């Protein structure tokens, strides 16, 4: 901490010169943001920015501090055990780990420290080009973006940045393979609005709105779902990521379709449940369709023409997966194309109260409930219910009291997906059914 404060003081004294001489996109390090006049105060105190962003980033008590802890967890026993199983040496030195647990910037300034974990510039962009200009009088946000700042207020830009680590990217160390998960790495999950809320370190007031656009929670959710699926399909179509030797890369598939109890008892019954959205032969490993289910719900309300194409291409993709890889890759590209169109449609759409309620109704409706046959899709639906309901409360379209009445049923649904090994489709569908009844009272 002492080193951080000293470096921050030096940073403040040299900021103008640094910005004048350094090339664009150099990552100068967290210390370059941590001056007391900038982002490292102990109490929020500014009308333009909070000034306590570093404190929030360093929070040891909850998810807001997860990025600052990211590199440190590589030094802990679990990470070391994973690295040993994979033959990587020390986890904190392995590119396969620090690609997401640290800032993988190619150009690093004098104050950059990998031990800072996922620092400010990992998300906001290398600061050398805009470090001094972003606090100068009269400089607009667009000017800073032109100098290398990442426009995270744009839902598609934000989703792209987050997905690199929270789903997978093409940069070194930004793809958690099935092999890495088999060595002990936790399951990767993503929901843009929820993750944005957990990492929120800014106030969405009138001043923010005068400088940047403010996407609604529903827009963030919908764009995040579309871009997550597009990313998945694109990576699957790339032989460097979609295959592992003679087998497909199982990261893309539903884990519990294989990780089920096996019994030779003649009275044993299969635990798999038929999913009407996946027309595949019994025994075929199903693609993880969590984002497909959510996009089906959103597209039917907001973009019905695209929804019809999306449903057709989704079914065609599942069928192709049971044929051969070349057919599956072609079908994945087709599905990725309509998914890309959906993300564009969502990004430019202002979701109304009635549309949000309709999407929520679709997520918990009977047609979608039939597709909640596996853990991942069910877990994604609970996050969607929470996100959509919170968005309605935030916009004033549903009272906090009415939303609170749904909380017991939502909590039961969360409980049903707490342990993936204890997931029971019938129990989860029961919880969803109760939520569906309650949602109808909000109209």
Image (cartoon, rainbow, N blue to C red):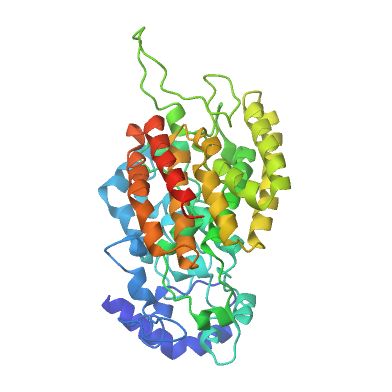
**Eyeballing the image, is 20 above or below 367?**
below
Rendering coords of residue 53 (x, y %): 39, 75
In the rendering, at what x and y percent does residue 371 appear? Answer: 52, 34
- Establish if 108 lies above or below 18: above
| Quarter of the image where one finds residue 11 | bottom left
Closest to the observer, 136 or 412 = 412
Toward which corner of the image does residue 362 lie, by quadrant?
Answer: top right
Residue 95 shows up from this direction: no
Q: Which residue is drawn at the image coordinates 33% and 74% (left, top)?
A: 55
Tell me where residue 236 appears, x and y as whole percent: 60, 39
Quadrant that contains the N terminus = bottom left
Q: How many marks?
A: 0
Location of residue 15 in the rendering, given as x and y in whole percent from the top left corner: 48, 87
Depth check: give the residue in front, 203 or 370.
370
Kindly identify the residue that appears in the image at 36 percent across and 50 percent down.
91
- 373 vs 324, nearest the viewer: 373
Left or right position of 156 against 174 = right
275 with respect to 255 (left or right): right
**Above or below: residue 232 compared with residue 138:** above
Residue at image position (45%, 82%) is: 49
Among the 4 quarters of the image, the one containing residue 24 = bottom right
Give the farthest residue toward the bottom. Answer: 137
Residue 283 visible (yes or no):
yes
């Amino acid at each position: 901490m002492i080193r951080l404060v000293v470096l921050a003081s030096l940073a403040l004294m040299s900021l103008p010169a640094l910005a004048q001489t350094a090339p664009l996109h150099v990552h100068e390090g967290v210390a370059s943001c941590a001056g007391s006049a900038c982002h490292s105060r102990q109490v929020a105190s500014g009308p333009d920015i909070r000034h306590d962003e570093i404190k929030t980033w360093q929070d040891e008590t909850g998810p807001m501090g997860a990025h600052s802890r990211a590199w440190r967890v590589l030094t802990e026993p679990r990470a070391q055990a994973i690295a040993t199983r994979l033959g990587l040496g020390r986890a904190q030195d392995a590119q396969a780990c620090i690609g997401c647990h640290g800032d993988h910037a190619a150009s690093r300034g004098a104050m950059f420290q990998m031990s800072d974990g996922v620092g400010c510039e990992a998300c906001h962009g290398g600061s050398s080009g805009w470090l001094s200009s972003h606090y100068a009088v009269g400089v607009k946000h667009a000017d800073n973006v032109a100098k290398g700042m990442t426009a995270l207020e744009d839902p598609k830009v934000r989703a792209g940045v987050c997905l690199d680590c929270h789903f997978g990217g093409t940069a070194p160390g930004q793809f958690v393979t099935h092999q890495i998960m088999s060595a002990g790495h936790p399951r990767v999950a993503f929901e843009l609005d929820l993750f944005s809320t957990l990492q929120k370190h800014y106030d969405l007031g009138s001043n923010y709105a005068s400088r940047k656009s403010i996407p609604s929670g529903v827009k963030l959710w919908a764009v995040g779902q579309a871009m997550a699926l597009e990313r998945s399909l694109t990576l699957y179509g790339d032989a460097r990521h979609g295959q592992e030797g003679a087998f497909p890369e199982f990261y893309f598939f539903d884990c519990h379709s294989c990780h089920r109890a096996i019994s030779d008892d003649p009275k044993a019954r299969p635990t798999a449940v038929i999913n009407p959205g996946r027309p595949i032969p019994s025994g075929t490993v199903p693609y993880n369709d969590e984002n497909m289910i959510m996009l089906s719900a959103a597209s039917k309300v907001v973009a019905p023409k695209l929804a019809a194409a999306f449903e057709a291409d989704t079914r065609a993709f599942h069928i192709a997966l049971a044929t051969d890889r070349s057919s599956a890759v072609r079908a994945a590209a087709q599905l990725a194309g309509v998914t890309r169109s959906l993300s564009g449609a969502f990004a430019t759409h202002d979701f109304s109260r009635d549309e949000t309620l309709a999407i929520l109704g679709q997520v918990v409706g009977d047609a979608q409930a039939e597709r909640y046959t596996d853990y991942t899709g069910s877990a994604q639906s609970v996050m969607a219910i929470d996100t959509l309901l919170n968005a309605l409360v935030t916009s004033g379209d549903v009272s906090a009291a009415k939303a609170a009445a749904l909380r017991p049923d939502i909590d039961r649904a969360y409980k049903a997906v707490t342990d993936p090994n204890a997931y029971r489709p019938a129990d989860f569908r029961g919880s969803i059914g109760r939520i569906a009844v309650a949602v109808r009272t909000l109209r």
